[in-house]
Amino acid sequence: MKQQDIQFDNTGKLRHFLTIEDLPRQTLIDILDTAENFSTVGSQSAKKVPLLRGKTIVNLFFEGSTRTRTTFELAAKRLSADVLNININTSSTSKGESLLDMLRNLEAMHTDMFVVRHGESGAAHFIAEHVAPHISVINAGDGSHAHPTQGMLDMFTIRRHKQEFQNLRVAIVGDIMHSRVARSEIHALNRLGVPEVRVVGPHTLIPRTASTLGVHVYHNLREGIKDVDVIIMLRLQKERMQGAMLPSEAEYFSQYGLTEEKLSLAKPDAIVMHPGPINRGVEIESVVADGPQSVILEQVTNGIAVRMAIMSMVLGRKQESAG
Ligand code: CP
């Protein structure tokens, strides 16, 4: 079954959020507009709205995370949902319980949503295919396949700074090969109408099929970021690399690391983004990561409003049909 088939329920509403690929443009715009409404909740004295009161959301992170797990938890709490964080290392999976048995047991606790991060591409989709009908699944990053909430928070951040997508030049730099973030961003940028999306990196870290994704491929950083409006730097995903894909980190930094001098080739008002975690001195120098053009910490803040938007759209759908 194709992913776009299971993301929507039989009334055409979003039930799961697994990938941006093939989502209609209007769904992406709805997420961005809804997130805009939620963006002030964090600065209220009582940082809560009652939209998901009585709902129970389970965070299932089979792979490490700082930003995504905590902002999902905060987003759920700000929507007044109850949140369970399952510690996979101390769960009964360590006693041989299968993933599906674990899910059946969590479903039996009358939970409503699973937020899933997993090292295997396709894991969130597999879980979505096997959960009970009342459960929704959100993909919080699966292998090198997709990280759709990161993709959407990055679109939110770009729209905040650049207003329109239609005139932008965006460069995504680094380890495109292993990056689920890059895939989700490319789908979102294309769907939102960005006319020029570039990917920049060494031959070993750009898939040969990249141009079929509707991007322009560059192997020279200076050429790749010339006159762009947005630069998205990516981490080298060494945990997903097999064999020697790079000469050395020092050589990588000299060719692909973003320095102040190289940043000056982009438009003067270009913004610098990074999904985190950052490796300072490997893909980006500190003076750029912490500099005036960096919006890296804004991305983290925006992640809460965007995750609130997606969770409320997915679980609010059921409240609408019940009401
Ligand atoms: N951007 C991102 O996914 O970061 P974490 O791995 O810390 O969640």
Image (spheres, grey):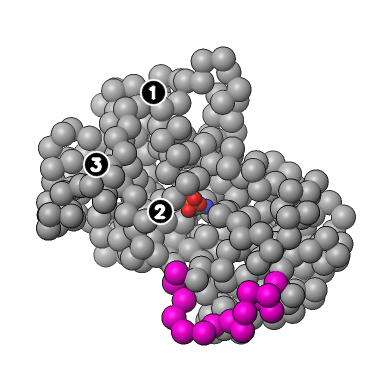
Q: Which of marks 3 and 2 is nearer the N terminus?
A: 2
Determine which residue is flagged by label 3.
Answer: 135
Q: In this view, does 200 lie to the left or right of 228?
A: left
Q: Is residue 121 left or right of residue 197?
A: left
The residue located at (56%, 59%) in the rendering is 185
The residue located at (76%, 55%) in the rendering is 288
Can residue 107 be seen in the rendering of this structure?
yes
Report which quarter residue 317 is drawn in: top left
Q: How far apart are marks 3 and 2 (CA)?
A: 24 Å
Q: In which quadrant will I find the N terminus? A: bottom left
The location of residue 7, given as percent across then percent down, is 34, 52
* Disc 3 versus disc 1: nearer the observer: 1
Report which quarter residue 229 is drawn in: bottom right
| Residue kind at label 3, given as amino acid type | Ile
The location of residue 214, given as percent across then percent down, is 60, 72
The residue located at (25%, 55%) in the rendering is 127
| Residue kind at label 1, given as amino acid type | Ser
Q: How far apart are marks 2 and 1 (CA)?
A: 25 Å
Residue 244 sits inside the magenta stretch: yes
Residue 25 sits inside the magenta stretch: no
Q: Which of marks 3 and 1 is nearer the N terminus?
A: 1
Q: For mark 2, give the secondary structure.
A: loop
